[in-house]
Image (cartoon, rainbow, N blue to C red):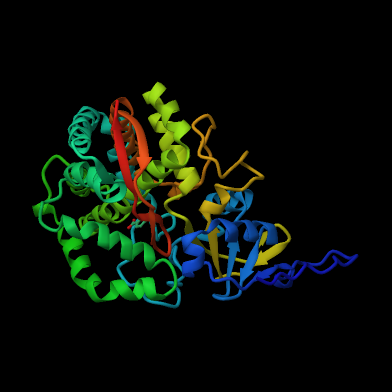
């Protein structure tokens, strides 16, 4: 890790140049960093508010203030050139770009305005009782077993029981949702071994996911059908509808699964916090948001500078990629007290784990309702969650995830 101190400022004010930007030579997508990103994040924040990551010739920011500012500046930091390392101005994307994620106003706005009310809290009210009942049944089943894997048996299973039904997906092909998301989030990073291992199967998997976005396979009452209905009204085109359904399948499964893995890991690492939740199960929602801050299942996204942009004394040149370390911003001690502690008594609002600004997670209310349903049922029925083996990380270029988390659930 090298760091060049900025030169002494000259007496006469001059335009800042890239030479003012300190550099690091660490690969943020190496296995070593992905296994435990916290030491790298601290080094990044301490190196400066804007850092040149030499390995990829990209800029990086790890402090809360600058990450937040970049997220809300969609005019200066665009998404349409891709929110991964690949620059769509020069490279062909591996799949047709998302109409929500990989787009800027004005093109971004119609899809966003269509999806927003479909996933808004008031639209989800009809799911609340159904998901609460599903969670009760689910916890019944869990408590029949001595030990479970909190990843495979809880974090993966519960969302896959409720979310595909809410979208209105057919049964056929649901097994492809997690591998699809895993590859998609890997593909936002460099073409390393994590991307390589997905390439053989992704063609068939993506074809299956695309097939699940077609109008004729979707049930008439789900989120998917509501997106197609918006095309009938003329709010979006019929050509856009399947790609917007694809966004639900892309961003709505792995993210929630790994967020649930993160919240369960939070309670394992801080067992006193489970007792806090037990005493007041209504704190399930704040527990989930604290986990989004603490674990930040989506660790990073890129933007591309639309002009030379001054950031804290340095400049991001036009056309260059900037990597925003959401997980680092969510642990910045300049913003958070005792940031590495998972703490239900803190106010986690303002975390950037769902992003910020016009692209902020449109599905966050769905994720919160899934988590709340599950945590509420668990909190009322489970006295203690005990580790039953060493948890194992799952490596992904973008997501912070667990592969396995053996636990014992002690019934109340
Ligand atoms: C936030 C996010 C992640 C991945 C995919 C998409 C969105 C999408 O819109 O396809």
Depicted 390 relative to depicted 339: above or below: below
The quarter holding residue 94 reads: bottom left
- 300 to the left or right of 261: right
The image quadrant that residue 325 belongs to is: bottom right
In the picture, measured across the screen, residue 275 lies left or right of residue 119, that is: right
Question: In front here: 9 or 64?
Answer: 64
On the question of residue 213 being in view, the answer is: no
Q: Which residue is at a point 28% across and 75% down the rendered structure image? A: 199
In the rendered image, residue 62, in percent from the top left (x then y), is placed at 60, 56
Residue occupying image coordinates x 69% and y 62%: 47
Ligand 1 located in image quadrant: bottom left
The residue located at (49%, 45%) in the rendering is: 294
User: In this rendering, is residue 53 above or below 282?
Assistant: below
Asked whether 349 or 241 is in front, the reply is 349
Task: Name, please, the residue furthest toward the right.
Answer: 11
Q: Position of residue 127 (x, y in %)?
A: 22, 32
Q: How many marks?
A: 0
Left or right for 242, reference 49: left
Q: Quadrant of the C terminus?
A: top left
Give the image location of residue 32, x and y in percent: 50, 67
How far across and down, in percent of the image, does residue 271 sit? 45, 35
Q: Nearer the viewer, residue 79 or 52?
A: 52
Query: Residue, x 24% and y 47% (percent of image)?
Result: 153
Taking the view exactly as shown, the residue that stands out farthest to the top is 279
Task: Inspect this view and state whether residue 90 appears.
Answer: yes
Of the 4 image quadrants, the one containing the N terminus is bottom right
Left or right of residue 72: residue 283: left
Q: Looking at the rendering, which quadrant does residue 130 occupy?
A: top left
């Amino acid at each position: 890790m090298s760091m060049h101190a900025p030169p002494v400022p000259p007496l006469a004010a001059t335009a800042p140049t890239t030479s003012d930007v300190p550099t690091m030579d660490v690969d943020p997508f190496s296995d070593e960093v992905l296994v435990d990103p916290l030491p790298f994040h601290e080094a990044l924040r301490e190196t400066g508010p804007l850092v040149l990551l030499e390995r990829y010739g990209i800029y990086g920011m790890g402090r809360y203030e600058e990450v937040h500012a970049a997220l809300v500046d969609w005019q200066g930091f665009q998404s349409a050139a891709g929110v991964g390392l690949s620059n769509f101005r020069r490279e062909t994307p591996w799949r047709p770009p998302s109409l929500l994620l990989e787009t800027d106003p004005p093109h971004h706005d119609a899809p966003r305005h269509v999806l927003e009310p479909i996933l808004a809290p008031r639209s989800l009210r009809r799911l609340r009782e159904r998901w609460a009942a599903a969670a009760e049944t689910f916890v019944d089943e869990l408590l029949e077993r001595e030990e479970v894997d909190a990843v495979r048996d809880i974090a993966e299973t519960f969302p896959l029981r409720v979310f595909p039904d809410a979208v209105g997906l057919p049964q056929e092909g649901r097994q492809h949702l997690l591998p699809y998301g895993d590859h998609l989030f890997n593909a936002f990073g460099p073409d390393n071994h994590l991307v390589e291992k997905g390439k053989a199967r992704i063609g068939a998997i993506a074809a299956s996911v695309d097939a699940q976005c077609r109008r004729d396979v979707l049930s008439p009452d789900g989120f998917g059908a509501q997106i197609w209905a918006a095309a009938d009204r003329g709010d979006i085109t019929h050509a856009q509808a399947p790609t917007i359904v694809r966004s639900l399948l892309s961003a709505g499964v792995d993210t929630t699964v790994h967020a649930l893995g993160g919240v369960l890991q939070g309670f394992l690492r801080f067992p006193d916090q489970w007792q806090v939740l037990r005493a007041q199960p209504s704190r399930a929602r704040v527990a989930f948001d604290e986990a989004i801050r603490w674990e930040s299942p989506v660790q990073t996204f890129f933007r591309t500078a639309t002009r030379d942009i001054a950031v804290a004394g340095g400049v991001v040149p036009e056309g260059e990629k900037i990597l925003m370390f959401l997980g680092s911003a969510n642990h910045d001690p300049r913003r958070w007290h005792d940031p590495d502690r998972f703490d239900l008594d803190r106010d986690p609002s303002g975390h950037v784990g769902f992003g910020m600004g016009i692209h902020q997670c449109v599905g966050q209310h769905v994720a919160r309702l899934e988590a709340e349903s599950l945590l509420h049922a668990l909190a009322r029925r489970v006295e203690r969650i005990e580790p039953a083996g060493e948890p194992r990380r799952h490596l992904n270029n973008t997501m912070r995830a667990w592969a396995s988390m053996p636990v014992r659930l002690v019934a109340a």
